[in-house]
Image: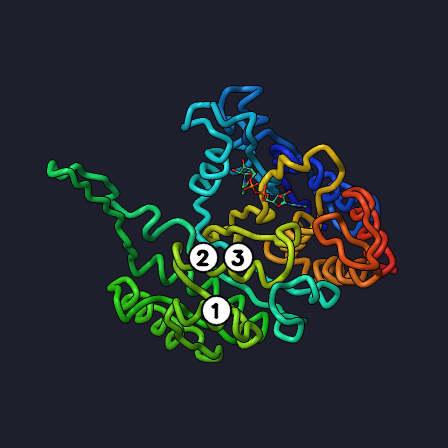
Amino acid sequence: MATHKLLLLPGDGIGPEVMAEVKRMIDWLNAQGIARFEIDQGLVGGASYDADKVSITDATMAKAVAADAVLFGAVGGPKWDPVPYEVRPEAGLLRLRKDLSLFANLRPAICYPALAQASSLKPEVVEGLDIMIVRELTGGVYFGEPKTITDLGNGQKRAVDTQVYDTYEIERIARVAFDLARKRRNKLTSMEKRNVMKSGVLWNEVVTQVHQREYKDVTLEHQLADSGGMQLVRWPKQFDVIVTDNLFGDMLSDIAAMLTGSLGMLPSASLGETDVKTQKRKALYEPVHGSAPDIAGQGKANPIAMLASFGMALRYSFDMGALADKLDQAIAAVLAKGLRTADLKSDGATIVSTAQMGEAILKEVQALHG
Ligand SMILES: NC(=O)c1ccc[n+]([C@@H]2O[C@H](COP(=O)([O-])OP(=O)(O)OC[C@H]3O[C@@H](n4cnc5c(N)ncnc54)[C@H](O)[C@@H]3O)[C@@H](O)[C@H]2O)c1
């Protein structure tokens, strides 16, 4: 059995609390011989600043580069608001994304049947929803140069951001999305603004070419990003995989997030290029939520986003899709039994702590494993 090297970076606030539930799961998997994970752990964010005055040390970065996957909790909190900008907690996460060249951000939006009532949309619109948003993460307007504010000298200033994409950046994110679609319901929707943006024209052209050349078996459709946003709240179940740029992806994935209820439910994966020699790719898995300082240390955090992020690692880094399916089924079963952390509370539900939720999900996985 292959040994998988996992680096755990719990971070700040509720990060360590939700990561503890992943450790509980990993310990059991290792003890049962179902998988062999070699775990290392490091500091990131405020915790790293407190120890070493940086948001991530070079030594921890080296461990991240050497790992098969990184599991990241959350960083930040008011305690570190006064620290210098370059070493603020979030800088640790940005360095990880940059140094590991994590260009593809995967955000599933899944609505567990038991939580359909918790959505702001009608239950029939979201019940059973299972879509995946693939966002380009290292290019586009967030990084393009020039990026300036110029004083025009007449009491006016001019701000410039630059939206820029090269062919290879669009090709590689398109391939990630087409590959995912093939493993799901075989449909990809590409979103851009080709009606008003040159980068949208190129995006559309390149995605179409990749489709023609390499993925003719996948159904491809194009939508303008604004009407795509509308469709996402009108009838989200029409989508399977959506691929879009950094800016639109940032917004569309947050919209999709709210279809499913709480922030505490949302996992994500960020993937790099596949190494041609080893066939492995750098990857970081993290919940979408932050460090939730308002509830940290109280045992109230929902560990599902963190556990589901581990599930994505099983699926996308370790080729353990069957185990990932069991973890997803276990989460659905626990919710169906009425167990809820405080963020999900609803009439008739049993409110449980972070650890109780983690234990209950592990018990379901154990039962499913027989
Ligand atoms: N990737 C990251 O590490 C990341 C992401 C977002 C925010 N942050 C940082 O986190 C800190 C707090 O930011 P924020 O309050 O805007 O966002 P947040 O996601 O930490 O919290 C927003 C709200 O959602 C609740 N919440 C979040 N996760 C939850 C969970 N698992 N279970 C139950 N409730 C949960 C919180 O209690 C809070 O009320 C800030 O320092 C921010 O910079 C970090």
- The residue carrying pointer 1 sits among few (fewer than 14), some (14 to 19) or many (20 or more) residues within 10 Å by Cα, namely many
- From the viewer's perspective, tell me whether residue 263 is left or right of residue 28: left
Judged by depth in the image, the label closer to the viewer, 2 or 1, is 2
Tag 3 residue: 106
Circle 1: residue type: Phe
Q: Which residue is mark 2?
A: 251
Q: Going from the N terminus, do you reach mark 2 or mark 1 first?
A: 1
Disc nearest the viewer among 1 and 3? 3
Residue at (53, 23) in percent of width and height: 49
Which dot marks residue 87?
Answer: none
Asked whether disc 2 touches disc 3, contact meaning CB atoms under 8 Å apart, the reply is no
Q: Mark 2: which secondary structure?
A: helix
Ligand 1 location (quadrant): top right
For marks 2 and 3 on the same chain, the one whose residue lies earlier in the sequence: 3
The kind of secondary structure element at disc 1 is helix
Residue 128 appears in the rendering: no
Q: Callout 2, which amino acid?
A: Met
The quadrant of the image that shows the C terminus is bottom right
Rendered residue at 64%/37% (across/down)? 8
Task: State the residue position of label 1.
Answer: 178
Q: Residue furthest left?
A: 154
Residue 361 x, y percent position in the rendering = 80, 53
